[in-house]
Image (cartoon, rainbow, N blue to C red):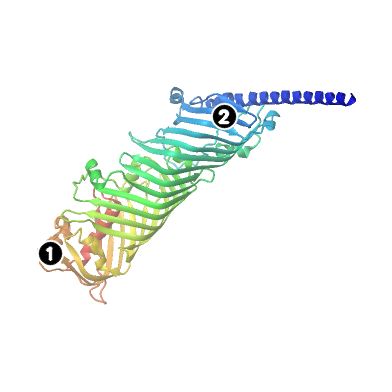
């Protein structure tokens, strides 16, 4: 009997303990739920409205709690713009529309939450989502603005009384669709479309007692964005494509692979759609890396700012078609082209490694375009500062480059250009090393009505100053055993040129024999070399490569003609 009474007494105690545990768990779950629901559906909604001055609003579907699995689930989250309120702000915010689906907070520390020590969880994320952003054209300052913190809250957050801090180890959005549009004057826009963007954050902490956490972008130690097959449309006929893009908003770095910028149309289609454009330009790079990138300025439409940009395996192709009718009144100097971007640009240094630049000209009467190739380009540009709306001749960019002209002759050039000058201004100087003169025929015989038969270039030196679109300078070519022959092809090209060059070539084009040129420069070892004058006026629609080539070509012809 005594043994039975002990068993019953033990059972009673166990039952009491079980009831206490159940009640305690119920109370804990009730308390946890009473914290989570107001946090998500009350505090978060109110904070978004306060921080945006009512311009943005947050809405969540029903919150599902599973404390056995330490899991909080929300079917959908919507972050939208209150257009009427936003329009009344002194500086309206970007128009944002975010829809997230199948969202969850996992690994919640229930005991920490219940005892009032805060919300601590392993992860937060949404399985799918779409983000649409329209950035209005900003009002630009004519002075360089200091980089501002991006995604850092300007006002301190006040957490609920029962929730002194929030800490989530990992925040992941693995599959976001993105539609980003940047308005440009007067009515254009730059558009970025992306089907699959990964957004990852680590150590997300909101803690009023931790000032260092408040100074982080979105309260996180690191923010990484990874995208595949990114497409940006600067305008209706061109596209920038990136095979792989990774950027870190914490250390302000960007790494892009397989980059290509080109018209979306073929050259004939492009010519039909834009008959006033003679140039067809495409640019590609195997890799582009940026350090010190101001992602905030870029995302808010305030321009591109970076400390250093490195470009590997760069390739640029420029084709100028002189068979198409010209419009002399259309003049787009480098300064005008930058101004038309309607965006500021500030790069402390840009380094190009192992690049290639190909310049082609199509001329009437010729079957194929003439081609000049600059291979193995190594270049460094410093102080690339263009501030939208600024006009100044100071603060000039410096560019130093070395390459192999037509893959054989070492070509060194230095260019200084004030990017915000009111008119086309620059200086350039350089040298071309030893090479066979016949290597230039790949360009000459498909542009001019003659070709080089033989000859050896020893060195060519040139220097010029461009003022208001007029290049003035000198060129001194040193060469030996030079001769040329009339091809009787494309005679409308150089024959139509004004001045002494056109007169000289028109005189020799009727000859059936050799083109008469000075065979050597200097003519004798004891004589000084002849120097040609550079005087070329910037023509409508000339690209920078075309302008430089034309100025050097005309000066060369003045030296070699007999």
Nearer the N terminus, badge 2 or badge 1? 2
Where is mark 1, residue-wise?
508
Q: Report the label total.
A: 2
> Residue 88 location in percent, x, y?
44, 24
Quarter of the image with the C terminus in it: bottom left
Q: Nearer the viewer, residue 363 or 542?
A: 363
Report if residue 394 is visible in the image.
Answer: no
> Which picture quadrant has residue 95?
top left
Q: Residue 100, relative to residue 516: is it above or below?
A: above
Q: Secondary structure at mark 1?
A: helix
Residue occupying the point 55% across, 28% down: 74
Q: Residues within 10 Å of mark 2 (few under 14, many from 20)?
A: some
Q: Nearer the viewer, residue 275 or 139?
A: 275
> Residue 62 location in percent, x, y?
55, 23
Q: Residues within 10 Å of mark 1 (few under 14, many from 20)?
A: some
Q: Nearer the viewer, residue 94 or 23?
A: 23
Spatial CA distance of label 2 from label 1 is: 85 Å
Where is mark 2, residue-wise?
73
Q: Secondary structure at mark 2?
A: strand
Report if residue 386 is visible in the image.
Answer: yes
Q: Nearer the viewer, residue 375 or 380?
A: 375
């Amino acid at each position: 009997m005594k043994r039975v009474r002990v068993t019953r007494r033990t059972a009673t105690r166990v039952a009491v303990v079980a009831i206490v545990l159940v009640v305690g768990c119920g109370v804990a779950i009730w308390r946890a739920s009473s914290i989570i629901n107001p946090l998500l559906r009350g505090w978060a909604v109110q904070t978004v409205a306060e921080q945006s001055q009512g311009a943005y609003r947050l809405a969540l579907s029903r919150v599902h709690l599973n404390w056995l699995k330490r899991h909080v689930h929300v079917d959908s989250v919507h972050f939208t713009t209150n257009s009427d309120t936003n329009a009344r702000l002194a500086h309206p915010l970007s128009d944002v529309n975010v829809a997230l689906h199948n969202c969850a907070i996992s690994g919640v520390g229930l005991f920490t939450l219940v005892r009032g020590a805060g919300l601590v969880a392993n992860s937060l994320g949404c399985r799918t989502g779409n983000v649409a952003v329209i950035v209005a054209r900003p009002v630009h300052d004519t002075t360089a603005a200091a980089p501002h913190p991006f995604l850092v809250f300007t006002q301190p957050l006040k957490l609920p009384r029962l929730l002194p801090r929030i800490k989530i180890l990992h925040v992941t959005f693995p599959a976001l669709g993105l539609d980003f549009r940047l308005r440009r004057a007067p009515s254009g826009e730059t558009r970025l479309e992306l089907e699959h963007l990964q957004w990852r954050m680590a150590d997300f902490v909101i803690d009023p007692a931790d000032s260092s956490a408040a100074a982080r972008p979105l309260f996180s130690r690191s923010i990484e964005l990874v995208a595949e097959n990114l497409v940006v449309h600067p305008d209706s006929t061109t596209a920038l494509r990136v095979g792989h893009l990774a950027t870190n908003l914490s250390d302000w770095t960007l790494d892009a692979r397989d980059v290509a910028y080109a018209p979306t149309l073929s050259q004939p289609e492009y010519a039909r759609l834009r008959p006033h454009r003679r140039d067809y330009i495409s640019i590609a790079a195997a890799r582009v890396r940026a350090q010190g990138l101001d992602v905030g300025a870029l995302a808010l439409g305030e321009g591109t700012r970076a400390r250093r940009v490195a470009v590997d395996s760069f390739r640029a192709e420029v084709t100028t078609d002189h068979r198409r009718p010209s419009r002399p009144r259309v003049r787009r100097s480098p300064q005008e082209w930058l101004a038309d971007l309607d965006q500021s640009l500030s790069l402390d240094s840009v380094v190009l490694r192992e690049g290639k630049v190909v310049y082609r000209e199509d001329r009437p009467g010729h079957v194929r375009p003439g081609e000049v190739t600059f291979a193995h380009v190594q270049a460094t540009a410093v102080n690339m500062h263009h501030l939208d709306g600024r006009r100044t001749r100071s603060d000039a960019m410096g560019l130093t480059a070395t390459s192999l002209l037509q893959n054989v002759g070492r070509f060194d050039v230095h260019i200084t250009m004030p990017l915000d000058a009111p008119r086309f201004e620059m200086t350039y100087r350089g040298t071309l090393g030893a090479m066979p003169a016949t290597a230039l025929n790949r360009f000459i015989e498909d542009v001019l009505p003659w070709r080089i038969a033989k000859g050896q270039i020893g060195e060519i030196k040139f220097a010029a100053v461009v003022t208001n679109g007029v290049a003035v300078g000198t060129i001194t070519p040193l060469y030996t055993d030079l001769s040329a022959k009339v091809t009787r092809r494309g005679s409308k090209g150089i024959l139509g040129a004004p001045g002494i060059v056109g007169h000289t070539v028109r005189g020799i084009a009727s000859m059936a024999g050799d083109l008469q040129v000075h065979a050597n420069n200097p003519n004798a070892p004891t004589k000084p070399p002849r120097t040609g004058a550079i005087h070329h006026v910037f023509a409508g629609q000339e690209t920078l490569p075309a302008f430089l080539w034309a100025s050097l070509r005309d000066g060369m012809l003045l030296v070699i003609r007999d």
